[in-house]
């Protein structure tokens, strides 16, 4: 089934329930990643940047409460929406997680798979954040305007140092990176991003005026997901390539 583009992380240690929920959500066109314990759930939350997390409370390695605290303490995951799935209906338990910022708390025994699917479907997909690093002012503004019209949040940088600073301080879903820029060239920015554990997961599309094989090979070797030649690229082509890079499972 074609996906809606909404990415869900299901963190649940009960194998039967996890599989049943996953199948039900996939039938609704949702892209679902699963984790069987808290540590795996936290790792996937940081690497996959889902639109929504369905989080069990009682789990091995890290409890749901510990995972939630870690999510809210990390700039990259602080804003992710979390729905709690629990066996407990105690007011104290509900209040403890509510104070950390959740989008809902549901007792498993009171929730059918259909109701779960409807709840998840009602949560809007997270707006994707793209960094456009391009020193050509005209091209930067034109590409920024087109990407914004496509529904993306766009941050811009006019040189390599600014691009690196933004990538290290702002949660991002994608970087569009020009090769030839002032202060720090694109390949050096790409190398530094991929060497840093905090930014290594961010997919990078390299933009260049030239399509020489050695440049393409260097971009791939450094971890770029695509290499695009500006002269052969329309703004619609750029949008299409951005969509492909942001699609679930593309990384």
Image (cartoon, rainbow, N blue to C red):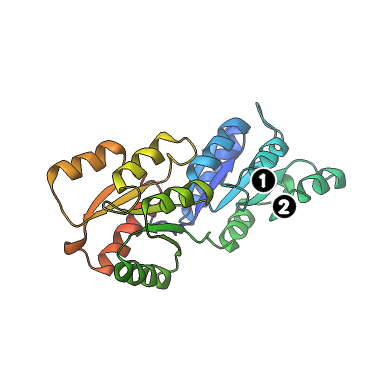
Mark 1 vs 2: CB contact within 8 A: yes
Of residues 245 and 179, the one drawn nearer to the viewer in this rendering: 179
Mark count: 2
* SS at circle 2: loop
Identify which residue is drawn at 79% across, 41% down.
88
The residue lying toward the viewer, choosing from 59 and 145, is: 145
Q: Residues within 10 Å of mark 2 (few under 14, many from 20)?
A: some
In percent of the image, x 45 and y 56: which residue is there? Answer: 29
In the current view of this chain or complex, which residue is farthest to the top?
61
Position above or below: 32 against 133:
above
On the image, the x and y values in percent for residue 159 come to 37, 55
Q: Which residue is mark 2?
A: 101
Task: Kindly tell me whether residue 37 is visible in this rendering.
Answer: no
Q: Quadrant of residue 238?
A: bottom left
Looking at the image, which residue is at 53% across and 41% down? Answer: 46
The C terminus: image quadrant: top left
Q: Position of residue 223 (x, y in %)?
A: 31, 39
Does the rendering let one see residue 161? yes
Question: Is 77 positioned to the left or the right of 250 in the image?
Answer: right
- Residue extending farthest front: 183
Q: Please tell me whether mark 1 sits on a helix, a strand or a loop.
A: helix
Query: To which residue does mark 1 refer?
Result: 72
Residue 197: % across, % down? 47, 35
Q: Position of residue 72 (x, y in %)?
A: 67, 45
Q: Residues within 10 Å of mark 1 (few under 14, many from 20)?
A: some
Screen quadrant of the N terminus: bottom left
> CA gap, disc 1 to disc 2?
8 Å
From the viewer's perspective, tell me whether residue 142 is left or right of residue 40.
Answer: left
Q: Which of the marked residues, 1 or 2, is nearer the chain's N terminus?
A: 1
Q: Which disc, if any, is residue 106?
A: none
Task: Tell me where residue 157 sits by quadrant.
Answer: bottom left
> Which of the 4 image quadrants contains residue 147?
bottom left
């Amino acid at each position: 089934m074609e996906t809606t583009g909404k990415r869900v992380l299901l963190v649940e240690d009960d194998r039967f329930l996890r599989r049943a929920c996953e199948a039900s959500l996939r039938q609704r066109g949702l892209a679902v990643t699963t984790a069987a314990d808290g540590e795996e759930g936290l790792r996937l939350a940081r690497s996959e940047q889902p639109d929504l997390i369905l989080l069990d409370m009682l789990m091995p390695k890290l409890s749901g409460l510990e995972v939630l605290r870690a999510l809210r303490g990390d700039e990259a995951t602080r804003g992710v929406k979390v729905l709690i799935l629990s066996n407990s209906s105690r007011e104290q338990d509900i209040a403890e997680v509510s104070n950390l910022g959740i989008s809902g708390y549901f007792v498993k025994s009171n929730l059918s798979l259909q109701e779960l699917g409807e709840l998840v479907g009602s949560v809007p997909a997270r707006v994707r954040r793209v960094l456009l690093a391009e020193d050509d002012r005209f091209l930067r503004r034109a590409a920024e305007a087109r990407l914004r019209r496509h529904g993306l949040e766009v941050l811009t940088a006019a040189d390599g140092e600014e691009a690196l600073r933004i990538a290290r301080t702002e949660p991002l879903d994608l970087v569009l990176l020009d090769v030839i820029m002032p202060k720090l060239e694109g390949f050096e920015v790409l190398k530094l991003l991929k060497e840093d554990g905090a930014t290594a997961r961010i997919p990078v599309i390299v933009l260049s005026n030239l399509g020489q094989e050695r440049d393409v090979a260097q971009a791939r070797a450094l971890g770029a997901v695509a290499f695009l030649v500006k002269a052969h690229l329309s703004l619609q082509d750029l949008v299409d390539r951005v969509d492909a890079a942001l699609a679930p499972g593309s990384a």
